[in-house]
Image (cartoon, rainbow, N blue to C red):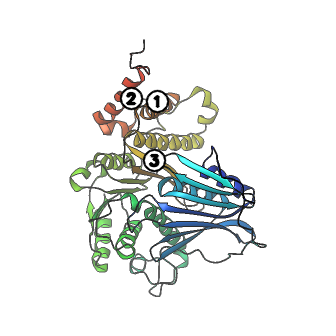
Amino acid sequence: MKQQPSHLESTLPDIVAQALNEGACIQLVLSKPVEKNSSAWRKVSLRPVSIKGKPHFQVALSRGQQEVHENLNPAETMQRIAELWSDHFREGYLYTQLADYHFQKTNQGAVRLKKQAPTKAQPLQIESHDRAKQYLIPEGTPCPFLEAIGVMTRTGKVKAAQYRKFRQINRYLEFISDIVPALPATGALNILDFGCGKSYLTFATHYLLTEVLQREVNITGLDLKQSVVEHCQSIADGLQCRGLRFKTGDISEFNAVSSKCDLSISLHACDTATDAAITSAIQAEASVIMAVPCCQHEIFQQIASEPLQALLQHGILKEKVAALVTDALRAQVLEICGYRTQVVEFIDTEHTPKNILIKAVRRKSELSQTDLQNTVQQYESLKSQFGIESFYLEQSLGTRFQEWCQSSRKVGRHDKSGQMKS
């Protein structure tokens, strides 16, 4: 006999994590997408599988006639489900050995959660899934741009020396697919790739949006090296890539506002070049900002903390701490400036040590004054704890950023009755 539904105080990621850790998860389904356009994922389902004798989970993402499968370990699965639930779906069903759970987001942002007796049985044997991962750009299928940049042969075979790059490109495209619903649903998409370099991922972005999703684009790849720009433009011309061009220029001097920007990309832009790209994107009010930082020296020169002296006295450890603090400050600045920000793993550390992706999606409504005040306080507290007096990103945003911070401080000086605190 079924139990009567009951309301619980918990979150979908928490309960799913517990089910995964206990080996009790049978199936998870996310439905009712937040965005209604054709580019949005319509449904996600998850089930346990075995790969090389180890527990994994297959995540199936559906959009129109397209279905993409990802085989992930438990930690990767939780990160993926948390992102999808936070950004893309309103309803979730979790089936476990002990109970069924129904999650539903209200229009006010709260989550209703009901629990009842289990309705599904655990399979007697978890399916073995030792096969190649299905990528957005599949192996064995010829892809003109991958052939042109030397990753694939004409027959669609990935070159052995380029397999790491092939996997990185596909992982990157998964992130792009996830943020498409946050971009304008109609018209040409305006995209800026700051510090595009050899432009593997610029071409990948163009391919996904134009060939797979059938969108019109205006993509500009910007780089300092004239020879690199000319090489990339020759490839684009040879492939007849509509709406893709490359320009020589300094990120810090580029006017993104006049160029319009729906999506800003900066991958491995060195030191404060990442901050210059983020600044341009914020000033242009980009819908989405994606940044994979590279080397970071600005904070390294300033960072100091007496309680952490044992950690910071070692150069290699201080460098890692400085990089983490820099990215944490960037994430906080983006939150203050009106973005919902996540810091996630870009690709496995076995492929590159620069594996952090900052993903920021512009909020549809402003932070409440209380949330803004808390965010500003966290930002300033982090700077204070590590002795940081100047931060390029804050300075480059100028008076606009200071106005946001001052606004939160004014709220902090009032009590709930509206009277000034002493």
Q: Is residue 212 left or right of residue 62?
A: left
Numbered disc 2: secondary structure: helix
Percent of width and height locating residue 410: 36, 23
Res 174 seen here: yes
Please tell me which residue is depicted at 39% across the width and 77% down the height of the picture: 145
Numbered disc 1: secondary structure: helix
Dot placed on the residue nearer the N-terminal end, 3 or 1: 3
Amino acid type at circle 2 is: Ser
Amino acid type at circle 1 is: Gln
Q: Mark on residue 144?
A: none
Please tell me which residue is depicted at 40% across the width and 63% down the height of the picture: 36
CA gap, disc 3 and disc 1: 17 Å
Amino acid type at circle 3 is: Thr
Percent of width and height locating residue 176: 43, 63
Residue furthest to the bottom: 155
Q: Does 81 appear above or below 58?
A: above
- The residue nearer to you, when weighing 296 against 243, is 243
Tell whether label 1 touches label 2 (CB within 8 Å).
yes
Percent of width and height locating residue 414: 40, 20
CA gap, disc 2 and disc 3: 19 Å
Q: Is residue 67 left or right of residue 253?
A: right
Q: Which residue is mark 1?
A: 377
